[in-house]
Image (cartoon, helix red, strand yellow):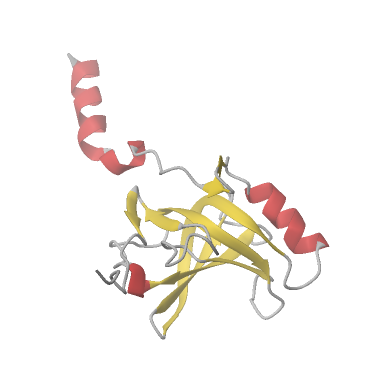
């Protein structure tokens, strides 16, 4: 009986969204796996403005800034929040959809573009976390916080 009560307590207190699987992240129509370690290597080894497709999962450390409809997150890419050498800046454009409620420690998944950026405090950013207005020139991206996906709203509806 105690084990059943413990199980029910765990189910009731464990957030359901943590079971949500993020949508596929594509690179030239190929499904990607998470590539945090590769991106951290790129950050340390490649020249500024180097770009690659990114698919990351990490924990929100804090919101760095919120300006001009862009929210900048500091995201830790491993489970050790006491280290900062594995952090990256994630930038989301709120014109493509509102952010779900979040706080420090929440799980963030981002599918978008990675850029080596010497002006970022973490020397790299992940951005373009939204649908592409023109799929011929750029692939879709998205942002997910605690399993709630955003970035899929077209701010300029197609003309009929």
Image quadrant where one finds the C terminus? bottom left
Residue at 46 percent across and 42 percent down: it is 24
Q: Quadrant of residue 86?
A: bottom right
The number of discs equals: 0
Q: Residue furthest top?
A: 1
What x and y, as percent, mark residue 121?
64, 76
Q: Is residue 15 visible?
A: no
Q: Quadrant of residue 8?
A: top left
Q: Residue furthest bottom?
A: 68
**159 on left or right of 89:** left
What x and y, as percent, mark residue 59?
48, 54
**57 on left or right of 158:** right
Q: Is residue 22 visible?
A: yes
Residue 7 lies, with reference to residue 61, above or below; the image says above
Residue at 80 percent across and 63 percent down: it is 46
Residue 31 lies, with reference to residue 4, above or below; the image says below
Residue at 55 percent across and 64 percent down: it is 137
What x and y, as percent, mark residue 89?
57, 68
Image quadrant where one finds the N terminus? top left
Residue at 70 percent across and 56 percent down: it is 40
Residue 25 lies, with reference to residue 128, above or below; the image says above
What x and y, as percent, mark residue 140?
46, 57
**17 on left or right of 123:** left
Q: Residue furthest front?
A: 160
Toward the viewer: 26 or 91?
Answer: 26
Toward the viewer: 157 or 79?
Answer: 157
């Amino acid at each position: 009986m105690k084990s059943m009560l413990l199980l029910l307590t765990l189910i009731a207190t464990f957030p359901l969204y943590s079971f949500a699987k993020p949508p596929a992240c594509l690179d030239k129509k190929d499904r990607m796996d998470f590539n945090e370690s590769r991106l951290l290597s790129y950050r340390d080894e490649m020249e500024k403005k180097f770009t690659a497709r990114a698919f990351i999962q990490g924990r929100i450390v804090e919101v760095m800034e919120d300006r001009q409809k862009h929210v900048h997150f500091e995201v830790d890419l491993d489970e050790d929040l006491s280290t900062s050498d594995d952090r990256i800046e994630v930038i989301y454009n709120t014109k493509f959809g509102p952010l779900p409620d979040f706080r420090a420690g929440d799980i963030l998944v981002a599918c978008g573009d990675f850029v080596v950026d010497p002006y970022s405090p973490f020397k790299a950013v992940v951005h373009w976390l939204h649908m592409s207005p023109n799929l011929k020139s750029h692939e879709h991206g998205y942002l997910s916080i605690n399993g709630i996906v955003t970035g899929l709203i077209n701010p300029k509806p197609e003309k009929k």
